[in-house]
Image (cartoon, rainbow, N blue to C red):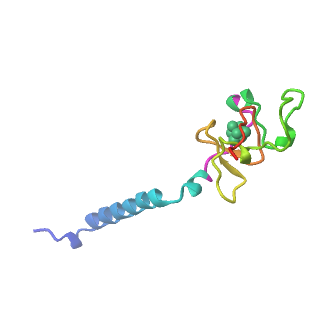
């Protein structure tokens, strides 16, 4: 008859399993904002970003190219922006898996409902 506590490989496996379960549980309860903050920043040179004229600062928008742009428009007040409190970056529904600059802008800008 084997003794569970005497077998080092079983103890090692049980320790690994408990650590893995704890890590998975922690990932499930981390605030959405914490995970969103880890998203890579959208590169303005990315073809999808370029197609919509994305810039990291709304002051960089070409008025000649986008005459309807207003300096008060930016990602932080766009309806597609998923705000992360206290962060200068956040997810955008149009660029899944990336975060955009709160002060950024693109031609898909749509103001948040008042
Ligand atoms: S859709 Fe809105 S939040 Fe997304 S990049 Fe364009 S302006 Fe920013």
Rendered residue at 37%/60% (across/down): 21
Q: Is residue 61 above or below residue 13?
A: above
Residue 16 drawn at (x, y percent): 36, 62
Outermost residue toward the right in this view:
64
Q: Quadrant of ligand 1?
A: top right
Tell me the chief SS of the magenta region. loop
38 part of magenta stretch: yes
- Residue 72, visible in the rendered structure: yes
Task: Give the side of residue 32 with respect to residue 73, left or right.
Answer: left
Q: Nearer the viewer, residue 95 or 4?
A: 95
Q: Nearer the viewer, residue 90 or 15?
A: 90
**Total residue callouts:** 0
Residue furthest front as drawn: 114
Residue 97: image x %, image y %? Answer: 58, 41
* Residue 42 visible in the displayed image: no
Up-down relation of residue 66 to residue 17 (above or below)? above
Q: Quadrant of the N terminus?
A: bottom left
> Which one is nearer the viewer's eye here, 75 or 98?
75
Taking 40 as reference, is 4 above or below it? Answer: below
Q: Residue at x 34, y 66 (%)?
A: 15
Hey, which quadrant is residue 110 in on the image?
A: top right
- Residue 26: horizontal and vertical position, in percent? 45, 61
Provide the residue span drawn in magenta: 37-47
| Above/below status of 84 relative to 78 | below
**Residue at the spot 66% in from the left edge and 44% down from the top edge:** 81
**Image side of residue 113 versus residue 68, left or right:** left
> Residue 111 magenta-drawn?
no
């Amino acid at each position: 008859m084997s003794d569970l506590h005497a077998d080092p490989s079983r103890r090692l496996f049980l320790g690994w399993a408990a650590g893995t379960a704890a890590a998975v549980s922690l990932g499930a309860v981390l605030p959405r904002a914490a995970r969103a903050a880890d998203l890579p920043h959208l590169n303005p040179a990315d073809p999808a970003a370029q197609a919509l004229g994305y810039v990291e600062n709304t002051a960089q928008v070409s008025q000649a190219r986008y005459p309807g742009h207003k300096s008060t428009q930016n990602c932080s007040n766009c309806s597609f922006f998923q705000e992360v409190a206290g962060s200068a970056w956040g997810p955008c529904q149009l660029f899944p898996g990336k975060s955009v600059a709160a002060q950024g802008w693109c031609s898909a800008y749509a103001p948040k409902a008042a």
